[in-house]
Image (spheres, grey):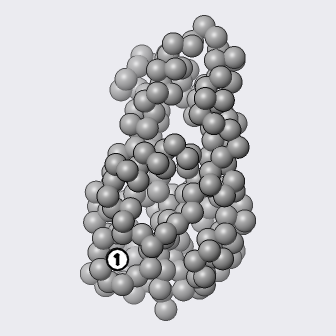
Amino acid sequence: MIKNIIFDIGNVLLNFYPYEYLKKKYSDEDALFLFSAIFDTDEWLDLDRGTITEEEALNKFIERNPEKEIILREMMSKFYNIFTPIDSSIMILKYLRLQGYNLLFLSNIHIGIYGHIIEKYDFFKEFAGGIISAKVKQLKPETDIFFSLIGKYNIKPVESIFIDDTVHNIQTANKLGFETIHLTDPDTLKDDLKLFGIKW
């Protein structure tokens, strides 16, 4: 019997498509540069893991590309704006709470981003709790972060559905006994949940 439903945040509840955002704001050349210089770096993962600060990451980016300091600073000052709500998923989240499910989140996300989104979006009040990578210094798809969630909230994987857009995270959850939904299109989430006996 399903008691717990665990949500990833990025591209499950909030859109996060940095390259598409960059293409709307910058030239093709600058968009490619910024994506490579910021989002496709070890420092971005270190921010998720909580082992460096945004200022430290920015300094690294500038060290590698000093001639691009202005545009790097500009992007790092506004990248929180990339996150936008997925309305259909948020409606489902609220419905599931009303149905009595225990809702949790498990996300690879920076400290600063998390502080920003929980202040901006009131749907986080639907959750009983959750874990973000930067606070526990663990990342999906490592098993440790799943064990942290299991231990903190005393849940059983066999009673839980884990929803994530990344296949490697789903594979780890499967190995640990979670029911899973690999969400490639938020519009399918309602039908995906029906497969587990959730009625609408």
**Is 167 drawn above or below residue 40 in the view shown?**
below
70 left or right, relative to 124:
right
As rendered, which of 169 and 150 lies closer to the eye? Answer: 150
* The C terminus lies in quadrant: bottom left
Would you identify the image quadrant in which residue 67 lies? top right
Would you identify the image quadrant in which residue 138 lies? bottom right
**Is 58 drawn above or below residue 154 in the view shown?**
above
Q: Which residue: 64% across, 30% down? A: 57
Outermost bottom residue: 1
190 left or right, relative to 38:
left
Outermost top residue: 67
Does the rendering let one see residue 184?
no
Would you identify the image quadrant in which residue 150 lies? bottom right
Q: Which residue: 42% across, 45% down? A: 116
Amino acid type assigned to the residue bearing label 1 in the image: Arg
Q: Which residue: 62% across, 55% down? A: 135
* Mark 1 neighbour density, 10 Å: few (under 14) some (14–19) many (20 or more): some
- The local secondary structure at tag 1 comes to helix
Does the rendering let one see residue 27?
yes
**Is 196 drawn above or below residue 188 in the view shown?**
below
Residue 79: horizontal and vertical position, in percent? 45, 33
Residue 90: horizontal and vertical position, in percent? 32, 62
Residue 132: horizontal and vertical position, in percent? 57, 57
Q: Which residue: 41% across, 26% down? A: 23
| Residue behind mark 1 | 97
88 left or right, relative to 27:
left
Residue 5: horizontal and vertical position, in percent? 47, 75
